[in-house]
Amino acid sequence: MTNLSILVIFPLLTTFAILFCRNVTQIKWTALIGSLLQLTIASLLMYSYYGERAAGNTAQMLFEARYSWYSAMNIEYYVGVDGISVIMIMLTAFVVTCGILISWKIETLTKEFFFLLLLLSVGAYGFFISLDLFTMFFFLELAVIPKFLLIAIWGSGKKEYSAMKLALMLMGGSALVLIGLLATYFNTDIGGGVHTWDLLKIAHMHILYETQLFIFPFLFVGFGVFTALFPFHTWVPDGHSSAPTAASMFLAGISMKLGGYGCLRVATYLMPEAAQHYSWIIVLLATIAIIYGAFATLMQKDLKYINAYSSVSHCGFILLGIGMLTKTALIGAVMQMVSHGLMTALFFGAIGMIYERTHTRQIKELGGLLKTIPFLSSVFIIAGLCSLGLPGFSGFVSEMVVFVGAWQQPDAFHRIATILAAASIVVTAVYILRAAGSAIMGPIKNEHFNHLKDATWNEKMASVLLIFAILSIGLAPFWLINIISPDTQIIMENIARGAIGN
Amino acid sequence: MREEQLVIKMNTDFFILLKPELSLTFIIFILLIIKVSDGMNKNSSIIHLANFLLLINFLLGFIGNTTGTLFSDMYHTNGLISLEKNILNFGTLIISLQAYEWLKNHKHVIEFYILLLTTLLGMFFMVSSGNFLMFFLGLELASIPLAAIVNFDLEKIKSSEAAVKMILSSAFASCIMLFGISLVYGTTGTLNFAELPTLITNNPLQILALIFVFTGFAFKLSAVPFHLWTADVYEGAPVPVTAYLSVISKAAMVFVFISVLNPLFQNVPNVWYNMLFLTIVLTITIGNLFAIRQNNIKRFLAFSSISQVGFILLGISSGTAMGVSASVYFLIVYIFSNLGAFGVIALVAAQTEKENISDFKGFYKNNKTLSWIITIALFSLAGIPPTAGFFGKMFLVTAGASKGNYVLIIIAVLNMVVSLYYYLRVVKAIFVDENESPIEKIESNLYSKIALYICMAGIIFTGFASVLYDYINSLM
């Protein structure tokens, strides 16, 4: 699997195939088989990536391919992957497959639903493999508008408001990114006044310190909107809770990671000096998001809102890791992206499956589900435990790495931020255990809960896939650390270069 | 003997260089003869013939394009201008295909085509003009028949009102421009575009003159603050005419803007840039803010097209070849996208008389294909990937950013988000909103189907494929 473009082309072909399907069964199977094959392709990619690295290939990016696109502006279709992107691609493949499995019962406008869901995944895959800033931006925006339709058409609650809020805020974020990218582009020079969008070339260029200070906020805040940077997190609770299950999974699992990946790969990597200059603001905002998110979750009564607000809190750890600017913290940030992606997808999946049966998401109306639908309830509890960071699950490992990395910053400000962030885990434990306790355990609150059917084959398959991924990180984190460590090293070297430059 | 050769050479030159204009004139004459001789009575056969002739005319535009001047520099043409004319030809052909539903029961089909093509002829002369006089001639030839076809919904009062508004304000704008031109002539002694740029200096009278000329242009482009006629005229005019106004007549004006005003101001770049800066900010912002409040879908597209013009000016303001190619490229994309949207609206308006956004609620229920077409067209207008509109907007903004004026870029880019809001409102109405009596299934005829599919293909492929942009770039 050395041709990366197949990662984009294959889901695109699947979407076209769906357009030609005649009935619901065909559509569902086409989507499922397509996404399973895509999962296989992603796994093969990871396998060959391991092979190349084991064989001693130390190039920064592997499997590069480069085609001139709009030559007048030096826009290229330039793709390549390093460990971070490979991991994100795996995450995307997992979440999309499980999203399709869980949406098995979608009845209204099935064709449109799967079409849009797969189109979203095209955007995500393309974003993670792009090394050309223009192409990257193209894929980033591609992954916004299908969400609007997914939420507005198939959503629940105040879906129109949420969909519009999400679309506008994300587009606002990408507008800021666009400004940052344009400013970057016009400040590059590859000889003869020719500008470039090439990410790697720009990383090795010395953009003036003052210019960096101007560009960095646009890029970081722009991408930050995607990953719930405080105070631009307000789309998260509404968007997640109104979205249909698969879209929530995609939103929290992948879409928010687009932002984290962009903050790391574009903002921090390309503007290392500015990243150092602004790092205290990032740490501050991330800490606020972590604490605010945790306490806001305490107040929620709706299961989906609980997970949505806790996502704000958990995504804070990603930003905290990036803001700390130590190698360990960056590794932790990437791990948290993966871990949160899987965990929150599982959580939303579980909530969606429970809602489908009980028709309520209010904690006080639920109860005793463990007795009637043991499989789904266990899935819910596993997701919850992962969320609160129980050792053995991925949440513990990644948060731990972030804290260790953060502690490496010796001054009081960073220490206080770390302590506050770590303290928020207690709050997390409170809301997760409370939700699990009263919604899943306890007496059966409603007569009709006795006749609920437990998970079907597709739901079991989705849950098992995600739990497998969570455990494989939680129990054996070193394969993940090994795969991303060299790339965070490169980012750190760029930052260190900046430190010397000053 | 030698003299004779010269005459012959001039004559062949005349025919080759003037090919687009002559071919249009030829069509006009054919239609006129049919009208006079009362040869064809069936509307549909006239439309078939007109579409056929327009297609031939469009195809002719691809061959034998050369560079040259005629009438002692009054008229000039080159590769880019030939392409621009053919873009206009193409747009007119699509509009003619879309107008079938409306025209098939109309009493005055031939007159419609004659007037339509006359305005197109005027635009051709305008685009090719090498002299202010020629330009003004073309401009008037393009404006006056246009007001007549705005009035072509003969029974509707609104249509007549729109025509009167248009002709009056258009005449006023022409006056101002003519005043500007006379001042230009008074201070420089020439009206030739090739000679003028070097003669223009920081002389206040000349700057005043240029501002008057610019005002005339801004009026025709409906740039803010000269946009007030736009919404009423768009609302009153028949849908195909509205499409023509918002696409073709704007595109022609932009082409002249590129080839005339840009060089004209080259000695006073600061005045030029500040003027454009102000116009761009106002045009994009006000266009957007007003578009949010509209309920009539034609008025809505009128204001959205105002803000699109702001983006085109943003590209032009860079003053580079990149800005020019980005603008021409964007206009092609804009023709595809806007005509895609208008095509659906024209079908709906012709069959149900419904023109409000609220009428489109639940449109998806009975008209799946048409809903997707108008949605994709609106996304392209909003600049959402993977549509070509994304690339068009991106290139314009990139060109605009080359000046390093990030205040302007920030305003423009944030306005893109605002514009997304109102485009999404329409999309929401189509897909999400409930409606007890949604629009019934619309039967589309073959012509509008062809037109819509061409637009869709254009929206999807002109973005991914860089061929078109590279071609435009090679003409610079």
Image (spheres, rainbow, N blue to C red):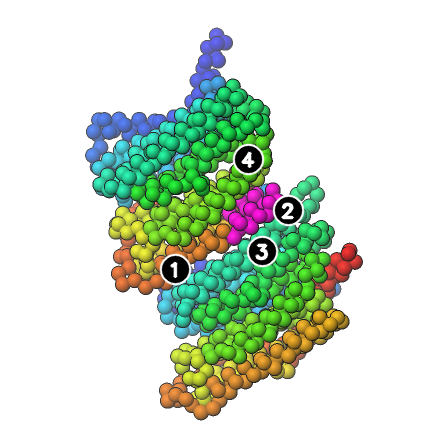
Label 2 packing within 10 angstroms: few (<14), some (14-19), many (20+): some
Of mark 1 and mark 4, the one earlier in the sequence is: 4
Label 3 packing within 10 angstroms: few (<14), some (14-19), many (20+): many
- Badge 2 marks a residue whose secondary structure is helix
Write the residue at 26% across / 50% down.
B353
Q: Is residue B248 magenta?
A: no
Write the residue at 30% across / 62% down.
B435
In front of the other: A176 or A20: A176
Q: Determine which residue is flagged by label 2.
A: A186
What's under tag 1, amino acid-wise?
Answer: Lys
Instruction: Please report contact status of discs 1 and 4: CB closer than 8 Å, yes or no.
Output: no
- Badge 1 marks a residue whose secondary structure is helix
- Badge 4 marks a residue whose secondary structure is helix
Q: Nearer the viewer, mark 4 or mark 2?
A: 4
Q: Determine which residue is flagged by label 3.
A: A177
| Magenta residues (range) | B393-414
What's under tag 3, amino acid-wise?
Answer: Val
Q: Determine which residue is flagged by label 4.
A: B272
Callouts 1 and 4 in the same chain? yes
Residue B428: assigned label:
1
Q: Chain of mark 4?
A: B
Relative horizontal placement of residue B262, taking residue B7 as reference (left or right): right
Q: Is residue A496 above or below residue A367?
A: above
Relative horizontal placement of residue B190, taking residue A206 as reference (left or right): left
